[in-house]
Image: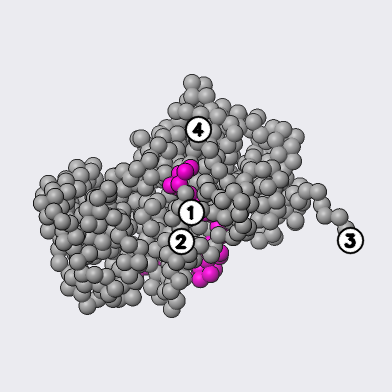
Amino acid sequence: MASPPTHPVAGSSADPESALDLRPHGVLTTGRVYANLSSAALTEQVLIRQEALLTDLGAVAAYTGKYTGRSPKDRFIVEDDMTKSTVDWGPVNQPISSAAFNLLLGRVQAYFQGKDLFVGDGWACADPRERLPVRLICEKAWHALFTRCLLLRPPIEELAKFSPGLTIYSASGLKADPERDGTRSGVFIILNLSRGIVLIGGTEYAGEIKKAIFTVLNYLLPQRGVFPMHCSANIGRTGGDTALFFGLSGTGKTTLSADPERQLIGDDEHGWSDQGVFNIEGGCYAKTIHLSQAGEPQIWNAIRFGCVLENVVLDQRTRHPNYDDDRFTENTRAAYPVDFIDNCVPSGQGGHPANILFLTCDAFGVLPPVSRLTPEQALYHFLSGYTAKVAGTEVGLTAPQVTFSTCFASPFLPLPPSRYAQMLHDKLTQHKAQVWLVNTGWTEGPQGQGHRIPLELTRAMVRAILDGGLKSAAFTPDSVFQVLVPDSCPGVPSKILQPALTWNDSTAYEAKARHLASLFQKNFAAYAGGVSEAVRRAGPVGS
């Protein structure tokens, strides 16, 4: 019997040398380059290099150290002739000069010399007409495996002629020098939109790779007439009722779109073109804190060989994940290919949506758990993007924090919010989708006094939206938020539909609701000048 190879074969099978040559990327490494390894080969390398642990499920469990979430204050966009007048500059999109970028790129290229490197080639955008070829060059095998989970995986014959439109250099072990490099700290995420290059360093949190790609596409897709969206999407088994779920991390996009009765298109990022909806990714990045087989069976079953767990605690003896242990972070994650979900849509594409759900996690406990929005209210709430950020999704966030993230995607939007809002308006006008506001946050009081709305009840509300169970309900405008609240919903106690009825102290409820209304009004002042009077009047009333 032939002896097994001492190392996995590097390079693509069609033309290994072309895939291994990193000189076009300015990298002259004397180490070994592993290009486009299979998930099995990458898993072997992860374990050989002791980058992560093997779980009893066959997945690898990696730990990211100090940074267990994104570092939004350390992200910069290169300001040049192309971006100077198009990017919405400010605290989210911080400028950095081309000269500073070039110096840091040189440092990354020099850092890679002498190191073993991993190259992963994949596609973003399931619609071939909008496809972006992405190349990752990194020092960590588990980052390559993570990216292989999240991107669409080209067939071998396509890898032989792969030409990246976006190249990501992930030098997780290299720290920037703020005084010399023009960064805020040792962490850096630098997007050069003109050159199609992203630099990431000083952090091992893999989510930076995923969100850098999304940010680039939020700049590119609108130029092609495609609406980029921070949402999950699924479709009924008959294929004619696509649904979108907008929301920030922790609001339930992944959980609620992974429905055994419907087919999953994708869990986080999509484009909406003239042809319909398509997944930007080829995988899922699900939160796993308090994951249970009963509550989220599809995600539970997707965690197996080929999957990457991030900051999930393992039992030292059995190596079984303990999803309830948050000692490292509440932002525990699982990355896996979308086809690990049994009833996914293989093409990653669907038709124009019939229903759009805005998911919010209301920490005040005063928003109705489900309500219908008029088109004007839809634009108001889209521009507002109210939620409570969940602990752990960003560095330094240890408790839920009230926030307004415009378009439910503020950290990832290079263009002015009005550009994306106009695209939503045009799509709603053309395709007549119904928009709903679903609160997955607190009931019977605010965070710290009440409790999260039970998942089974939220699922029942979502099911009623999608299968027409609310068509026979009567709707009444909420006295503060004006959204249309159903008087009944199949499978849901009527009392919970009216937040005021769940509080023991009606005066305290009224005060908290008026306070949140005032926060909405204060936040929306930034957008009021760019919308119609009907949209301005569609928000909460009173303060």
Residue underneath mark 3:
1
Q: Residue at x 74, y 37 (%)?
A: 31
Q: Secondary structure at mark 3?
A: loop
- Does residue 363 appear left or right of residue 498 in this picture? right
Q: Amino acid at mark 1?
A: Tyr
Amino acid at pointer 2:
Ser
Seen in the picture, residue 160 relative to 194 is either above or below; the reply is below
**Magenta stretch contains residue 331:** yes
Mark 1 vs mark 2, CA separation in Å:
8 Å
Mark-to-mark CA distance, 4 and 1: 28 Å
Identify the secondary structure beneath mark 4: loop
User: Which one is in front, 270 or 163?
Assistant: 270
> Considering only order in the chain, which callout, 2 or 4, is on the residue closer to the N terminus?
4
Determine the CA span between mark 4 and mark 2.
Answer: 34 Å
Q: Amino acid at mark 4?
A: Val
Asked if the stretch drawn in magenta spans residue 332, the answer is yes
Residue designated by label 4: 187
Q: Which element carries disc 2, helix, strand or loop?
A: loop
Identify the element where label 1 is drawn: loop
Give, as a three-letter code, the residue at label 3: Met
CB atoms of marks 1 and 2 within 8 Å: yes
Give, as a single range, the part of the protein colored magenta: 326-354
